């Protein structure tokens, strides 16, 4: 594994509710020690869409920033971080509008579903 930059200053913020939910989902992955990769890709209603998925820590590269939340790691490649720096990831279990919510200070527009944005 190449050495990634581990940041104590969090470029991606995580609410307590979101941290509880990702830890809960991580435990359901057969007890594997996984990190959460967050990034962006082309597409979605507003031009770019958020992506996040669990990943084995062995896939962390030197081009990644790693943010530690009490032992749980969030990983983001530096190119995506240009669009996501300052992002607040929250979670709500509301019947309507529940799930993960992205509040991105870099977004000039956001679609109604909240899963894509434009810069």
Image: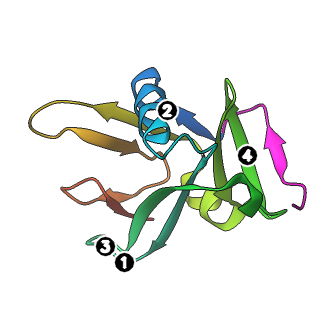
User: Vertically, is 53 above or below 23?
Assistant: below
Tag 4: Cα neighbours inside 10 Å, few (<14), some, or many (≥20)? Answer: many
Q: Position of residue 32 (x, y in %)?
A: 59, 45
Q: Quadrant of residue 83?
A: bottom right
Using the image as rendered, state which of residue 5 and residue 1 is in the foreground: 1
How far is mark 1 from mark 2, CA to CA?
Answer: 28 Å
Q: Which residue is mark 4?
A: 66
Q: Which residue is mark 3?
A: 44
Q: Inspect this view and state whether residue 48 appears.
A: yes
Confirm whether the magenta stretch covers residue 12.
no
Q: Secondary structure at mark 3?
A: loop
**Mark 4 or mark 1, which has the lower sequence index?**
1
Asked whether the beta carbons under mark 2 and mark 4 sit within 8 Å of each other, the answer is no
User: Which secondary structure is most common in the magenta stretch?
Assistant: loop
Foreground mark, 2 or 4, reads 2
The part of the chain drawn in magenta is 1-10
Tag 1: Cα neighbours inside 10 Å, few (<14), some, or many (≥20)? Answer: few
Foreground mark, 3 or 4, reads 4
View extreme (right): residue:
3
Q: Which residue is mark 2?
A: 23
Confirm whether the magenta stretch covers residue 5.
yes
**Drawn side of residue 88 relative to residue 91, left or right:** right
């Amino acid at each position: 594994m190449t050495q990634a930059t581990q940041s104590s200053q969090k470029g991606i913020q995580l609410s307590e509710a979101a941290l509880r939910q990702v830890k809960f989902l991580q435990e359901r992955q057969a007890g594997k020690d996984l990190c959460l990769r967050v990034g962006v890709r082309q597409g979605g209603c507003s031009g770019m869409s958020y992506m996040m998925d669990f990943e084995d820590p062995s896939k962390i590269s030197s081009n990644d920033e790693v943010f530690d939340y009490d032992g749980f790691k969030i990983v983001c490649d530096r190119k995506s971080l240009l669009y996501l720096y300052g992002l607040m990831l929250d979670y709500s279990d509301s019947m309507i509008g529940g799930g993960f919510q992205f509040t991105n200070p870099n977004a000039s527009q956001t679609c109604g579903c909240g899963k894509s944005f434009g810069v």
